[in-house]
Structure formats: structure tokens, C-alpha cells
Image (cartoon, coloured by chain):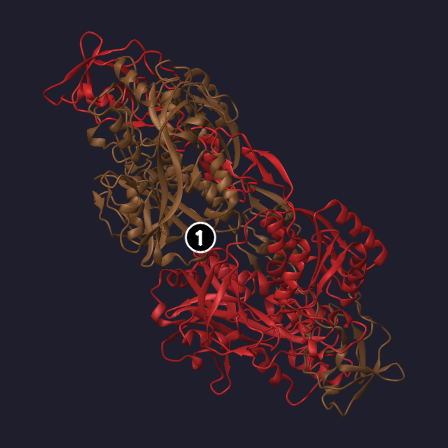
Chain colours: A red, B brown
Amino acid sequence: MTTDPRDAPAETAKPGLDQQQFLSILSREEALLRFEAALFPRPLPRETVALGDALGRVSATDILSPIDVPPFDRANVDGFALRAADVAASGQGRPVRLSLNAETLACGVAPTLPVAPGTATPIATGGVVPRGADAVVMVEHTEPAGDGGVEIRRPAAPGQFVSHAGSDMAAGELLLRAGTVMGSREIGMLAASGIPEIPVTRRVRVAVLSTGDELVQPGEPLGPASVYDTNGAIVAAAISENGGDVARLGAFPDDEAGLEAVLRTALADNDMVVLSGGTSKGAGDVSHRIIDRLGAPGIVAHGVALKPGKPLCLAVCDGKPVVILPGFPTSAMFTFHDMVVPVLRRMGGLPPRAETQVTAHIPLRIPSELGRTEFAMVSLVQSEDGLIAYPTGKGSGAITSFTQADGFLRIEALADHLPAGTEASVTLFTPSLRIPDLVIIGSHCTGLDRVLAPLAHKGRAVRTLAVGSLGGLAAAKRGECDLAPIHLFDPRTESYNAPFLTEGLELVPGWRRMQGIVFRDGDPRFAGRSADDAVAAALADPDCLMVNRNQGAGTRILIDRLIGTARPDGYWNQPKSHNAVAAAVIQGRADWGVTIAPVAKAAGLGFLPLAEESYDFALVTARRDRPAVQDFLAALKSPDVRDALAQAGFRPA
Amino acid sequence: MTTDPRDAPAETAKPGLDQQQFLSILSREEALLRFEAALFPRPLPRETVALGDALGRVSATDILSPIDVPPFDRANVDGFALRAADVAASGQGRPVRLSLNAETLACGVAPTLPVAPGTATPIATGGVVPRGADAVVMVEHTEPAGDGGVEIRRPAAPGQFVSHAGSDMAAGELLLRAGTVMGSREIGMLAASGIPEIPVTRRVRVAVLSTGDELVQPGEPLGPASVYDTNGAIVAAAISENGGDVARLGAFPDDEAGLEAVLRTALADNDMVVLSGGTSKGAGDVSHRIIDRLGAPGIVAHGVALKPGKPLCLAVCDGKPVVILPGFPTSAMFTFHDMVVPVLRRMGGLPPRAETQVTAHIPLRIPSELGRTEFAMVSLVQSEDGLIAYPTGKGSGAITSFTQADGFLRIEALADHLPAGTEASVTLFTPSLRIPDLVIIGSHCTGLDRVLAPLAHKGRAVRTLAVGSLGGLAAAKRGECDLAPIHLFDPRTESYNAPFLTEGLELVPGWRRMQGIVFRDGDPRFAGRSADDAVAAALADPDCLMVNRNQGAGTRILIDRLIGTARPDGYWNQPKSHNAVAAAVIQGRADWGVTIAPVAKAAGLGFLPLAEESYDFALVTARRDRPAVQDFLAALKSPDVRDALAQAGFRPA
């Protein structure tokens, strides 16, 4: 599932400079047990907040209603308070006349006169039912009588249109339990009871910092070997989502003395510290050594038999949790949610996060590793036979493995794979799953984003999964998607896509993408030459390094034709995307490669056109009439979309 | 379902002083259509927020990744960057020796030397793969060679342990669509792409005010005819929950000039104004007249064929929505969620609220009214045959009808009832339904809160529904609850509860509650007398007013025995709860009644003991072994709970 080598099996790790820390790998359950045992039970600090600030906070005590609601017997209509017995004999032809008492019970007016037999008191909705009265009649069912009296024309049941004191909430009744998360409904009950402020559990203050010499904060310029600090931002947001208050301290280089000073201050000022390591093990080692000195008991688990997430380090220093997350973003986020969020929520008095499970089938075999509990991030699509869970294939080093997944499934430590077709329970990342209106599985192209824009803005939920052309075709045949974008070249017919369609699929023309040779602008081996000349020059120069493409890519077939049987330097550098080719050339890791014109243009590279490829769609015919598919087909034909495609460098079919 | 007479059928309302406003009742759909047509389409104002402040905000534009992530071909392990072809022939007994290039690619260090054939460069996880290298081997699979070289003992596949540039996110790839609600996962993708701030839709600013002479803010003293302003607090919180910024202006008396000044300022300073009326129609009339003068087109719907919620008034003044919610809290909240939230969210760029529907059976016939779309608030419990939806029976005047419901079901305008057993679709108020661990349906007692406290604090979710003793017994027989609290007196055997049990139910003893006569302390007709003397004195005094109890209540049987065939003044005042009796006496609306000792004590009333009643539990035997039932039985026996019950004035059995 991932290529995170830090998730390698414990038994293959040899003792060495960097492996000492993993000598005692704990099971996920044992690690969590030790962490929680060192932290709980503990008192939860409280504070009092005004009702207007209580939304989302957690009540720290049981709260009883101090009053009856309504506080008095309340009239529910505009009309007259009277004695039901007085009008028992009334009817349409037999009005009963009552004399009116000399007060009108508007809202907020306390009655001063009892309702004696034969009398009535005018009363407004919300008014206090006076002594003696046991019912209210609506003004609509009365007529004024001549001399200040009123005529009643239908009998009233005792208690009619009266809400008795305490019938909504009784004094002493439990309004909410300690540990209740306050929503608008809870706030409404407290307001009705006149409670202006409530004791709540204080939010947990969490310091978040990142370590690593390569880290740069978003907005700052990116050096040639630096990356943006992703974990700091996502961990901070996830802490907020789980009720914590975040102190973001930023990113720090792997300097032991400096980092120790920062950590000691962070621990003193906060309830919890979360470090998201840089990606190097060296950075982690510095942090571990410091944490061991910060307070007892120190590190309680370091190395967990969990994938992704083995390098997780859990510590408790002077009663406060200190966590070092793995550096890889998906490892970091998964372990944060699996191992840290439960502790964070418990410290904040919050109930465990509600988890929604759905059942889904696995379309492909998922390999796993014996001896570790493994979690596979999956994206879900709906098929006629139920939900299908696609593993997100990018590994734990990719942030999108986590951020673009719908949830995850668990593979037990004793299994070495899940076979295709297995029914698995998927835990969702969000409480509910929105079934997409349109599912597109296959090869991705930035042009596709242009076609989908009008659908998205119309409110259609579109799910796209990038699994390559062949993966998309297979999904289409299995009925798991509406459309499979493909760009497959058939050497026999020298044509694209159509030869690959099978029964039940039809071709929807997409657009052409010009493939060509890219090089750094001004490179004399390429600039101003024809493509054939340029390739000949490149092959003749032993210092000229190419970047290839992966086997199976349409572009690879083109490259193989260009270079024939030559195996120039760089041939084995075989990335899987047009963007990686452009990046290798612009960054000087290669001198030439083949990519598509829009990518070359965006990267500012020289470009020698070779041949167009066709990026088309295999449409599942049975799904053609679905509204979102019709919207897609319309968008593909719309002048706006065709203009946008053309501007980006594509040629609509 | 409700006794809100303002929900009376349109056809029975006669033109009159207070009914003019309802002459043109619109259907729910037509009212919403007019409201939305007057408001949309409209531009959504934007602002730019820093990534750290973006949680929960809504992206205002599509956002593309400005860079490749990772930005370069990245090593995924600590080890050596090399050429795969160089080590293709290596193996456990056939190490290949490579000479090391004179640099170490720690994180953040840009390579300066290419990897030529026969060489390797030490590289850390996260390091930049240098020119010429096409794979990385783990340090664990190498051995230092004598003269500064390294021995490789297994072949490496091209691309091994390399994440190519853009393989996570490619430059130009769509990260998120306009209209996406930003969670931690979206923030993580933006951070990884180096985006420091994003354009978001500005939050909708909503002024909230309440009108009504009877309204008092929570925390202020409650006058004899006043009630706390509930709608102001709950509407404000519901606006926050739906992404709005609230300006709470407080409660205002029904003074036309003063209110107009407040409304004009509120409208000028905000994007939307929500008035929650007091409970009187007079208050509403003042607001309507003012709104008609505030701006065009003014009122677009006033009176909607919707129950609860008929008095809803929707207006648009100078392009801004102005809403008058019905005064009754459940009417107010239901119409707010049904008719106002969709507009509020759309103005804030938020997607419609995700609604979760579940299917449930109705245990009892639900009457409805022809000609109006009716929504019944329901509480859900699990039975062996699926979910059961209990209508919350308190009416739209009660805040708890809304706040304690799990959701609602819809009864079409053309139906006059839903028969018992109907399968209905219930829309939940929250995204997921927590199935309670313990369900208790029957008569409620504040003593029960004491027994449930230890369960709640242990994390058990308990659902209690107050439907009276007989309703609880019926639910227990149908298997819809674990326990039914009952206090039913059998005159034939002169005993409580046991005679009412049927097969499958067993009796769990609860506690005794002393019933007695309550009176205002010092009233000479009662103080210092025996109960019999006191009743005789009360019956002899024509000015002495009683408060009775409802037919069917155990206490009513006791009262009937006390007064025999006498029908003293107040006999027809028949509230349904112990608290209502106490409130009537303390507030002088009656002089005596019969209630239980804990309630008398809490109200500060004089008390003449009469007889104990037994409050016990009918346990569904088949459910005895469920863990939460066992917890309940243990709590009932625990010394702490028994002490708490005794302190509150109950006598544990």
C-alpha cells in the first residue's frame, strides 16, 4: 500500500545508528494503553462561559432547570380565560354570556383579579392564566356581547389552550449531563431556564511545532531542496476540529539546544505538545533525546506496529502528553487521528469522535504485511452491487493519500493481503458520505478540471480517481464509474482508444494533447532543431541525460519509437507523469524528455512537437442517461469549456 | 401533534383584528420559492483569510496547485542515491561496490554533484535525488566498504524509494473547488502547495432580536408574568452553526417607533435580520407593519401552510432578508431550519446542509390536519424490528419538543393522519444517530436522574421518554424499551405496579414517593392540621381553591378518595404533573393540591403527608442481561445513588 520504508517490518531492521529507537515495537493497542494509563484519570480544568459563548463547548457539570418552564400556566391563544364548567352547555345556537373582568392579560402582565364563576378575563397568547380559570377559548370562537360581556359559542375542555407550569421543563429536571457538547438546542434549553452562564471544561491548549531543516512556511519562497511545512498546518486544524486551542510555534531546524529551549517553553505554557517531525530520521532523534529529559515518565511508546505510522513516539512529561508524529503526512495524520485525537478529546471532556462505518467491496487485491495492523486509505464509489473501496495508491509520503480518501479499512496483523472482492468495513473520515453524482475513474488530465468546472458550480458532486487508462477501463467494465478517461495507443491500428472498448462501452471524444520534446530554453542541443535532429544530437552526447516515462504510458511508446534500441543515460529514470518529466528537466536532473505542451508551457520549457495523443472517454452506455452524465456531455461541447481547454493548450476534438 | 392554535386551519380563521395577516396563506414550497426568487442570484462578497484562519470557511474560487508536490524527485528512505543499472547484478553473496560522491544530501540540501555510473551519494529521507540517480537503496541494505565506498547487497528497481516531482499534487492540478468548506484536510493540501491565504466567501452577518413585553434575558430576575428569551439564544446559536456571524441585539418591547429605529439600524449594519417574535400576536403585528416600510419588495410570504410554523413571515428589504419567526419555540426553530437556513447557507456560499434520513415505524397513530404540510418531531428508539419514532407530545409551544427530538417526519397536506405501524422516513437533526445503550420509556421522576448519573458518567447513552406509566408499559410490551418506570395503583388489590405486569415483564423495585397536601406556608386552613382536618376545612371554605390532577394519574385516585363526591372550586384545573400543582399553589392560582414531598420541598410549600406511592420499573426480561441494564440495576442498589435519592426526598425500596 505504501512505499514508506519507515514502515518496514521490525524484524528486518538491523541495529544501527538510526534503528535503536525501534528495538521495542509495541502493538497499536498496547501503545495506546500505556499512553492513556500515564495520563488518566486526571482532573479536567473548568471555566465558566456565558451562554452566548457556549456553542461547541462541553458542559462540566450536570445542569438542572432552576425553574418551571413555562413558569406559570400559560395561555396558548389570544382569547378569554374562563371556567370550563361555565360554558359546558354552550353551542352554536346556545351562546353563553360571561361578564368580563376589569383587566386584560397582555403578555408580561400579572393577573390581579380571579376568574369567578360567570366571568372571563381577556388574555393574550403567552399570558398568565388567572386564579379560578381552568381553560382558555380562542377569540375566534367568541362574539362581543352588548354590555362589556362576551358570548361563547362552543364548550371548552378543562385545560384547553393552557400550557401548565413546568410542562415543558420542570424545576429540578435534568437539562443536560456533564460532558454534553453544546449545540443550539442545548443552548435553547438553558436560555429557557434562565441560565446565563455555565461551567465548561477548559479547552486543551496544544503547542504545535515542526522540525526539519528543509521546512518552509506557506507563502515563503521555496528553496531548491525545501518543502512546505504541511503537517504543522493540518495538525493545527485537526486540533481545532477536535476542540483544542492551538499555539502554532512554526518550524525549527534540527538544532538540539535551540529545540530543547523551545520545547521546554511549549510544555510549560500548554497542556500538550505535538511535534510533527521533518522527514529525516535525524530530526526525530534530536527530538527523542530532548523529550527523554523533559519530565517523567517520558517516552511511553516509540515505534508502533501500525502501518502507516510506525515511527510514532508517545511521551508523557510531568503529566502532559508530548507526541512526535511521523514525518510523512499521511502517516502523521493517520496516527494523529488514531492515537492522539482520543487523548485530546478525553482531556477536553469531549466524547469519542462519532465514527461512521460503511461496508464496501474491494475491487483489487490489497497486499499487506504480516505482523502489523495496517490501515488502507480508500476512496469510495457506488456500483450497482454496493460501495466499492479503491485504495488510494500514493503511499504515506503523499498528503493526498489522506486528504483525498473517504476513509480507511483495517487489515489485521495476521493477514498478508485482502483478496479482490473482499467485503470490508470502511470507517469514514466524515460523519456522512455524499454519494457522487458522477464518477470518473482513469487517467487524469488538468484539462478534465476545466470540463468539470460547470458541473461543480451547478452543485454536482464529482468523484475523480486517477488510476491510469487501463485501470479506468477495468473499472468501467465492472460498472464502477460513469466514464473512464483514457489515452491508449494501439500500435496495430495506429490509432487511439477506440480499439480498446468492449461491449457496453462507447467512445466520447475528448481532446488532443500535443506531445513533444522538452528541454531547458536555449539548450543548443535542442533549440532551433527539428525533433529528429534534436534526438540524434542528444543520443550522440554522452553528457546528455534523458528522463523516460513508465512502461505502459502512451508517451512511452512514442519515446521508444524515437530512440529505437538506444539506451541513453537516464533511460531508467521512469516517472509516471508529465509533470515529473518537466520538473526533472527544469531542475537539471535531466536534459530532455517527452511531455505534453500545456505542461511544458507552464514549466517554461522549450518544446519540440512530436505527435498528438487523444484523450477520450469510455462511457458506460447504461449510464448515459443519468443527469450528471448528460451535464458532462453538454459541458464537453460547450463553447466556454472548449475555449478554456484551448487556452490551456489542449485541442478539443 | 401540537396545541398551538396559531397553527389552526386557515379555513376556520375568520377575518378579524388579528387574522388579516393570514388571508393569503402560501404553500411551504411557494413561500420558499418567492423568498429565494427575491434574493438570488446575488454576488457573494469575498474576503481573503490566512490559511490558519480558514477552518470552516468556504473557498470563493477554484484553487490550483501552483507547484509540484513534492517539488523534486524525493528520497523516501535514508540511504544512497544510485543508478539501478549499477546494482542489477548484486545479491546477498555478490555485493556491488560503489564509490561515494563527496556530498551528503541531508534534508534541505540541494545536490551539486551528479551520480555518475559506479557512484552513489548518501541521501536522507526527504532529500533531493541528484542528477543521474534513478533509485535509492535503504541504508539497512548496505555495508560500508573500506575506502569510503559502499557495498550494495540487493538489486534496486528503477524508481525504488523515489517519489517523483508532482506525484502527490501536480502543478496546475485542481486542489479545491469554489464552494468547498475548508476542513483540516483541505488546509493540509493548501499548505503542501505553499498557499498562505485564500479567498473565501464573507460570513453572512445576521442581526437577531426578539420582541415581546414579557421577555427577560437569562440571568435577569423573572417577573411574575415574564418568561426568558429563548428564541434569541437558540436562533443566534443556530446561525453560528450555519456559518453566520451573529449580532445579538436583545429583546425589545412592542413599541412601534422604538422597534422601527432598531430595525432600520439592524438592516443597515447587517446582511440579514431575524426577529423572533414574542408569543403575542400583537407583537407580530407591530413588526409586520414596520417591515412593510423598510424597503422593497417587502413581505413576500406571510402565513405558510406549514405546521408547526404557520405565522412565519418572510420579507426582502433592499435585497436583504428580514424574517419574523413564530413566537413558539418549536415553531420558530423548525421554520428557521426549514425555510431560513437554506437561504442563510446559500448567501454564505455554503452547500445545503447534509440531511440524514432513516426509516422508522410509528408506534401510535399521529393525527394531522388536511391542507397543511405537517412535520412531527420524533424521538427514535431501537426495537428488534428496527427504529421506532415516538412523536414528542408537548406541542410547538414547548422548546423541548424541538430540542429533545432526534428529527422529524413529514405528513403530506392531503393526509389527515398517519396510522400506527406506518413506515416513515425521518430526517435527523444531527448527521448521525447514536443508538442509545439504554432506553427508558414511561413516567418520569427527578429521582430517575440520580440513578442514571453514574451510567451517563460511565459513557452509557441513555434515552428517556416521558409518556406516562401506561404508555411506558405498552412500549415495554412492544419491546421498544428496556425499562418502563411506572406508578400505577390497583384499587382491587390496593397495591402498586405488580398487578399491571404481563408476561415477559418483571418488576424492579424503585423508590417510594410521599404524596401529600401542599399549601402556602402559614395558611391557617392547613398549617398544623391533620390531612383529614385540612381537607374538611378546605371543602368548607367557598373561597378555597384546589388544583386537581389529570384523570389516570395515581395521585388523582388519592385525591378522589380524599374529596369523595365533592366538586370543590378548582376541581377542573387538572394539570398533568407534580410541578404544575406546586406552581399553581405557590403562585396563588390555587390554595391546595396534592403533590410529592420532593416537589413540595423544592417549592417551599407546606406539606401534609398522605400516602406513599411506589415508583418501580417494569423490566423487559429478555433485555435483563444487556450491559447497560446491568449497570442500571447496579446503580439502583449503589449506596451513593440511594443516598442521593434519600437526600432529594425519595425513599429507596
Kind of element beneath mark 1 = loop
Number of marks in the image? 1
**Viewer-proximal residue, A392 or A37?**
A37
* Residue indicated by mark 1: B434
Residue at left 28%, top 31%? B558
Quadrant in the picture for residue B254: top left
Front residue of B223 and B620: B620
Judge whether A109 appears above or below B235 on screen. above
Query: Residue shown at 47%/67% (left/top)?
Result: A425
Name the residue at the bottom extreme: B93
Residue toward you, A441 or A448: A441
Query: Percent from the top left, x then y, of residue B47?
Result: 59, 42
Residue drawn at point x = 61 percent, y = 62 percent: A334
Residue B95, x across and y down, in percent: 78, 89
Image-quadrant location for residue B596: top left
* Visible residue check, residue B141: yes
Left or right: residue A524 versus residue B365 is right
Residue B82 visible? no
Q: Residue type at mark 1: give it.
A: Arg
**Which residue occupies the extreme right position in the image?**
B147
- Tell me residue B502's x, y (percent): 27, 52
- Judged from this view, the residue extending furthest toward the top is A147
